[in-house]
Amino acid sequence: MRRKINRQMSIFELMHTSAIAKELRRISQTLDHTPDILDAVHRDLLQGRREDTGRCGLTADQVLRCAVLKQYRELTYEELAFYLEDSVAFRSFARLEMGVYPRKSILQDSIKSLTESTWEALHHLILGYAAGTRIETGKKVRIDSTAIETNIHHPTDSSLLWDGIRIMTRWMVEGHQLRPRPDYPFSDHRRVAKKRALTILNARKQETRVAAYRDLVEVARKVCGYAREAIPVLGAYQGDSFQDGCTAHLLAQQLERALRILEKVIDQTKRRVFRDEKVPASEKIISFFESHSDIIVKSRRETEYGHKVFFTGGASNLILDCVIARGNPADSDQYIDMLERHQQRFGTMPRQASADGGFASKDNLSFAKEHQVKDAVFSKRRGLGVLDMAKSHWVYKRLKHFRAGIEANISALKRRFGLTRCTWSGWRGFRRYVWSNVVS
């Protein structure tokens, strides 16, 4: 039976007097003022199952607090399990009873079940608490964007071809380990594929590199042919046990998805390497594992692979809003949406808004002024007059300096909370990771 919260706390629940323990105590008080979120956490944990059957497990309150602890201290699941067993302060914050020591697998399953909408709802409730206690009014905001990487290596055509050959061959080897063995032919070309990939990496002459690419593409074609024959066989496989049948069907689905990606990689390699064409970013494949990743290109900076994230900060240094965009949209295209989202959250437009120079445009300034934003300042004017943005040069300078504070907030999120690179898999995992870090 899964419960939302323990009805009675233990008399042994103590918090230390260190700085970290004091922070945890304040975070605990804030969570206690947002009890409505436990309904959403409880639904995520049940995942459609009945709540009055099965083992109790961790309560919704405990799971939420463990998730906050993990992101707040940037811990792995193994480290979190250790600290929950070893630290009195952590156990008191998580409200674990004596004798309850959750393993890392339990913690992972429970925390990963929390959806991105639940994290966003918790963030909204925390902002409501901040507004109620006058910590944040939302009248003065600063807007900026950053790129957060997904957990992939730097993509090259040769590494993508090698990834496809490697994982598809591995899955076909696993299929032949089923009993009775599925009847599909294939050969293991991983050794020669790895040699050709290393040759491409270390080649000094273009002719050597292109020749190695031709060999690698030919191997990839052979692997695609093997996969086309294996997919229908594995899809129709019955096996001696139900588990073998499920394994075969899963392998068929994985091979089918990887086959589509590898065929696109072969096509883009031909266009880029053999025909010297420029493939548009929207058509490029950059990962077999995190296929949702976007190519983020900023002027005079290195290309990044992940997603562009837009943040709205307040005078209290709280992150008031977060938008995770698909593709590589221009900053100026998101300015109006950020202001409208702020109006939905706080019921009114901000009195003053300061944004990075990339958000500057005449249309954005006109929209802000028409919607009662008295001072809409951009760090770079880009043809806009100072007095058109703010009521005086002094106000413009103050708001321009105020905007720089969100750079520190984003830096803290990346350095302290691990937002430089998302380590959770999938598009939904990326959204959960970002929102959980913002909340924490």
Image (spheres, rainbow, N blue to C red):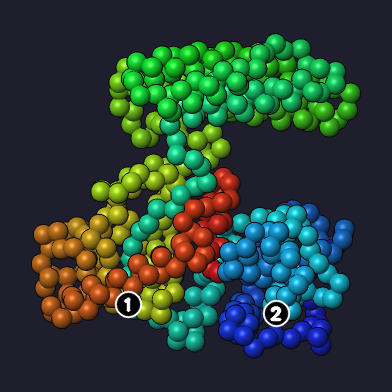
Q: Nearer the viewer, residue 217 or 339?
A: 217
The residue tagged with tag 2: helix, strand or loop? helix
Residue 207, horizontal then vertical, whole percent: 34, 15
Query: Which residue does the numbered mark 1 point to in the structure image?
Result: 140
Number of marks in the rendered image: 2
Residue 352, horizontal then vertical, whole percent: 27, 75
Relative placement, left or right, of 228 versus 43 is left
In this view, the mark in front (1 or 2): 2
Q: Nearer the viewer, residue 17 or 183?
A: 17
Numbered mark located on residue 89 in the image: 2
Quarter of the image containing the N terminus?
bottom right
Q: Residues within 10 Å of mark 2 (few under 14, many from 20)?
A: many
Whether residues under marks 1 and 2 lie with C-beta atoms below 8 angstroms apart, the answer is no
Q: Nearer the viewer, residue 122 or 82?
A: 82
Q: Amino acid at mark 2?
A: Ala
The residue tagged with tag 1: helix, strand or loop? strand
The CA span between labels 1 and 2 is: 36 Å
Q: Amino acid at mark 1?
A: Lys
Task: Look at the image and tell me whether residue 2 can be seen.
Answer: no
Quarter of the image containing the C terminus?
bottom right
Q: Residues within 10 Å of mark 1 (few under 14, many from 20)?
A: many
**Who's the residue at 56% across and 45% down the image?**
426
Numbered mark located on residue 330 in the image: none
Relative placement, left or right, of 264 versus 338 is right
Residue 364, horizontal then vertical, whole percent: 23, 60
